[in-house]
Image: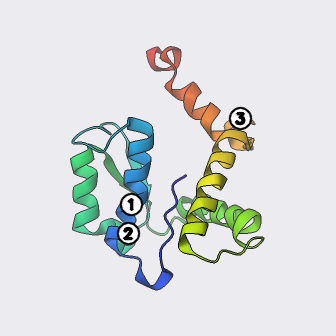
Amino acid sequence: MRRHPCRPARGTRFEALEPLRQGVRRHFGAVAKDVARGLSVRHDHGSCYMAHDFQAELAFLGAESSPAFVRAPEGNGCAERFIRTLKENLLWVQSFDTLEALRHALLAFRETYNTTWLIERLGFQSPAAARQARLSPAALAA
């Protein structure tokens, strides 16, 4: 999960790059040419994600653009469900005086969600445990 707080009316293709870079830095150690080769980034057809700048950044990183299917609501369903979870467990139960306070709360929620939440579709594992199992040497050799 990547989250980057911004003023809602001002989200741009450049704002969309920040969560991408955060995720690449966290999982690959740096933002560099071809560092994320083999990564597929699922996104909707929003103008931020279809913009040349966003697509060029994906190409630079070596990641593949994977737009959701048009008129296939289940593609956005996972993201919508996660946003609902985020609202119910953080945004509707806490107030934030500054964007910086919101950013810190989102980072803490990300850590808690990824390491402790047990997700049914992942076999009742946390997202971090499922990712680790997928990336383990035995799983990669199979």
Q: What residue type is labelled 1?
A: Glu
x 50%, y 26%: residue? 135
Q: What residue type is labelled 2?
A: Glu
Q: As displayed, is residue 12 above or below residue 70?
A: below
Observer-side mark, 3 or 1, equals: 1
* Residue contact between numbered discs 2 and 1, judged by CB atoms under 8 Å: yes
Q: What residue type is labelled 3?
A: Gln
Residue at mark 2 to residue at mark 3: CA–CA distance: 31 Å
Residue at label 1?
18
Q: As displayed, is residue 28 above or below residue 112?
A: above
Residue at label 3?
125
Numbered disc 2: secondary structure: helix
Residue at mark 3 to residue at mark 1: CA–CA distance: 28 Å
x 58%, y 25%: residue? 133
Mark 1 Cα-neighbour bin, 10 Å: few <14, some 14–19, many ≥20: some
Observer-side mark, 2 or 3, equals: 2
Q: Splitting the image into 4 quarters, where does residue 134 fall?
A: top right
Residue at label 2?
15
Numbered disc 3: secondary structure: loop
Numbered disc 1: secondary structure: helix
Q: Residue 15, position in %: x, y?
A: 38, 69
Mark 2 Cα-neighbour bin, 10 Å: few <14, some 14–19, many ≥20: some
Q: As displayed, is residue 55 above or below residue 121?
A: below
Q: Residue 138, position in %: x, y?
A: 52, 14
Q: Along the polypeptide, which appears first: circle 2 or circle 3?
A: 2
Q: Along the polypeptide, which appears first: circle 3 or circle 1?
A: 1
Which of the numbered marks, if any, corresponds to residue 86?
none
Between 83 and 114, the one lying in front of the other is 114
